[in-house]
Amino acid sequence: MPEQPGKNAIEVRDVRKVFGSGEAAVAALDTVSVSIRENEFFTLLGPSGCGKTTLLRLIAGFDYPSAGEIQLYGDNIALLPPFKRPVNTVFQSYALFPHMTVAQNIGFGLEMLRKPKAEIKARVAEMLKLVRMEHLASRRTSQISGGQQQRVALARALAPQPKVLLLDEPLSALDYKLRKEMQIELKRLQNQTGITFIFVTHDQEEALTMSDRIAVMSSGKILQVGSPWDIYDKPADRFVADFIGETNFLTASIAGVENGRARATLKSGATIMASVADGFQPKGEATVVVRPEHAKLVKGKGELSGTVENIVYFGTDTHIHLRLDGSDDLFIVRQQNARSASCGFETGEKAGISISDDAAQVLRD
Ligand code: ATP
């Protein structure tokens, strides 16, 4: 992760993209601005239809913005055709040529650029080594596995040394285990090549695992940009908290904010100190969120109490679902598992939930 903010590779400024016209008009991007730094692994994350592919396509040059600028190292490239941009894309479908060998596929972009034969040969060899595919160089791409095809697609896109590599859900066709391996592999490739990666996904776990920074998108807008831990620990609003990881939502009445902390009285009558995002002044009723790993089950009285409804074992941890007393809300507590120990509670048992100060946050709805 770059410690200091580096140079900006891409700057998206007040970009709008409207499809259709009149009553049928859809604002796929509703005045979006974001800076992507040189040499960073940047992820656009959001649910289906939020506009992430549209933004990627505008950066690639497959489509043009209705308004706004897209700068690459300070030059406005918004209206430049794709082949004139030092930007390359890896698609979900890989789009490899099945009748060509692995090596021919990797060299294809360089052939199109009419690079000298010797240079192409050397570059293809370098790329084969980078993606660990030397042993399959002369195999046709119709005769290799999905994971291997993914590596060839990456090598082909990296071969012309683009300044920015765009990746549109490139791992979604792979099975779970291979996807996990390729996440690590992609991170290694980005580190080793130093190329700026802009990665699109709707998978929050994938985004948290790989990214230096993430932009969370919803309905054509960017809601928050930050490091994985910023986004997880300090979500900007309720949508981000809900989209990233599991979260418990409680309603509380707020009595004053002091030094970024609010006194929040829960429906159970218990009062906790909750942190508040910069610049937010909650008043009256507000949403308080507690991550499942920041709450603890206790045998006696806690800030909340409920009945254990479900115990879900995940190997490394256990999720305990409780129905809260005095409301019908569900609350999840996540406990790390000690070796061969049960979580200490049974389904149907009454339990207290302890929420320590600062485990909770008051968020904008
Ligand atoms: P997904 O994860 O499903 O690919 P996304 O976040 O990438 O979704 P986009 O594909 O960018 O979302 O679409 C954003 C919005 O713009 C959606 O409402 C979509 O229906 C609309 N849209 C995208 N492309 C077009 C198009 N060519 N014509 C009309 N509407 C479009």
Image (cartoon, rainbow, N blue to C red):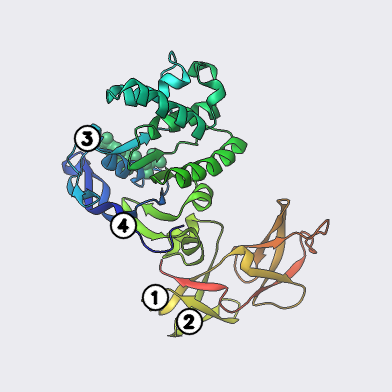
The residue tagged 2 is: 261
Residue at 27%, 26% (x, y): give it.
113
Mark 1 Cα within 10 Å, few/some/many (few <14, many 20+)? few
Q: Nearer the viewer, mark 2 or mark 4?
A: 4
Q: Specify the label residue 84 is tagged with.
A: 3
Residue 126 at x, y = what percent? 46, 31
The residue tagged 4 is: 7
Mark 4 residue element: loop
* Kind of residue at disc 4: Lys
Residue 77 at x, y = what percent? 20, 44
Disc 2 to disc 4: CB gap under 8 Å: no
Residue at 72%, 54% (x, y): give it.
316
Mark 3 Cα within 10 Å, few/some/many (few <14, many 20+)? few
* Kind of residue at disc 1: Asp
| Along the viewing direction, whichever of 289 and 184 lies nearer the viewer | 184
Disc 1 to disc 3: CB gap under 8 Å: no
Disc 3 to disc 2: CB gap under 8 Å: no
Sequence-wise first label, 4 or 3: 4
The residue tagged 1 is: 278
